Image: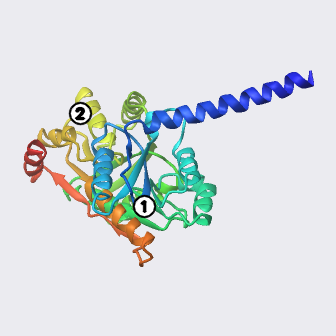
């Protein structure tokens, strides 16, 4: 009986090892940019493939590694449903790279691995979400507090009462700056009220159903602000389906062509986004500065772009020419 128990444990360990190796191979397939005689190696932990924003970040990171002969490894969370961002960080730290670029989302859950990275002198640059963990070396991305103030400022009709539904992607502590930024600006306007905050689902179908229920049960809502790069077009399609175009204003947070077209049609009032290419470039510059021993900014805020009916044609033309 004891022998069988030992054999079972050995089999589990072997299978676990095979699973990890297979998972890594699947994640990294076609995403290694190693160069002969490279002088440094960095890892980018990417949230999603086939997404204009994350693809722009990756292309920029890789492009800005060429002149310095830096090897880039991209670990893609969306390549498998079995390994989380935190688990990818753990694997990245084990490989002891020269530095790691990763979203600051849910940084509190990454504390153990961030401590390990610090002990191994592996610099960490957060992008996109500031995170709450002080163990990062720098942050590159939008000023989420300020950006959300700007979102409220896009509600420009002083003669109209706005009742706002905020749809936030995560609903975790790290998103506090997003909510606090909007609430602080709402409090500056007598004609703008916060109706409710809805934590969104990762699934587009669930997102649409949840918002449909909320709007149906709260008919006073006439503004929906979606804070994720996935929200804008999903909410727009729902508002068209519910025949509420013009009755409900939408503020989006992405620069996709689909969202720009909805602005052109008058379905979405405005969108706010940051340029993924700039984030990738500045994250690389920051990481190279840290590795070289020079002093780096704790936070580099990438400017927020605001697109509305007044300037959307400029951006649609720009997208079509790329």
x, y percent for residue 220: 33, 42
Q: Is residue 109 above or below residue 6?
A: below
The C terminus lies in quadrant: top left
Q: Residues within 10 Å of mark 1 (few under 14, many from 20)?
A: some
Tell me, for residue 244, which label it has, or none.
2
Based on the displayed image, in which of its 4 quarters is residue 248 positioned? top left
x, y percent for residue 15: 66, 28
x, y percent for residue 108: 58, 56
Q: Residue at x 59, y 35 (%)?
A: 20
Snapshot colouring? rainbow
In the rendered image, the residue lying farthest to the bottom is 295
Number of the front mark, 2 or 1 = 1
| Disc 1 target residue | 40
Q: Residue at x 33, y 40 (%)?
A: 230
The N terminus lies in quadrant: top right
Q: Nearer the viewer, residue 53 or 267?
A: 53
* Residue 190 at least partly seen: no
* Residue 156 at least partly seen: yes
> Marks 2 and 1, how far apart in space?
54 Å
């Amino acid at each position: 009986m004891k022998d069988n128990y030992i054999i079972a444990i050995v089999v589990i360990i072997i299978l676990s090892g095979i699973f990890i190796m297979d998972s890594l191979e699947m994640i990294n397939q076609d995403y290694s940019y190693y160069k002969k005689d490279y002088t440094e190696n960095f890892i980018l932990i990417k949230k999603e493939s086939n997404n204009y924003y994350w693809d722009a970040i990756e292309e920029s990171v890789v492009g800005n590694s060429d002149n310095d002969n830096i090897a880039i490894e991209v670990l893609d969370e969306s390549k498998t449903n079995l390994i989380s961002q935190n688990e990818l960080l753990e694997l990245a730290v084990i490989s002891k790279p020269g530095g790691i670029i990763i979203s600051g989302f849910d940084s509190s859950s990454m504390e153990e691995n961030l401590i390990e990275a610090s002990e191994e002198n592996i610099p960490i640059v957060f992008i996109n979400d500031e995170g709450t963990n002080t163990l990062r070396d720098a942050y590159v991305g939008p000023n989420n507090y300020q950006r959300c103030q700007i979102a409220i400022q896009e509600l420009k009709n002083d003669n109209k009462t706005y009742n706002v539904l905020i749809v936030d992607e995560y609903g975790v502590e790290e998103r506090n700056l997003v909510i606090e930024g909007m609430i602080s600006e709402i409090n500056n306007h007598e004609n703008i009220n916060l109706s409710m905050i809805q934590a969104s689902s990762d699934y587009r179908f669930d997102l649409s159903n949840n918002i449909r229920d909320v709007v149906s049960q709260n008919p006073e809502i006439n503004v929906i602000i979606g804070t994720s790069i996935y929200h804008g077009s999903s909410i727009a399609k729902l508002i068209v389906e519910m025949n509420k175009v013009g009755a409900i204003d939408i503020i989006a947070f992405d620069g996709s062509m689909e969202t720009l077209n909805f602005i052109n049609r008058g379905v979405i009032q405005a969108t706010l986004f940051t340029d993924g290419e700039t984030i990738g470039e500045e994250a690389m510059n920051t990481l190279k500065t840290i590795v070289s021993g020079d002093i780096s900014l704790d936070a580099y805020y990438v400017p927020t772009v605001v697109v509305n009916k007044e300037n959307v044609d400029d951006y649609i033309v720009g997208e079509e020419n790329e």
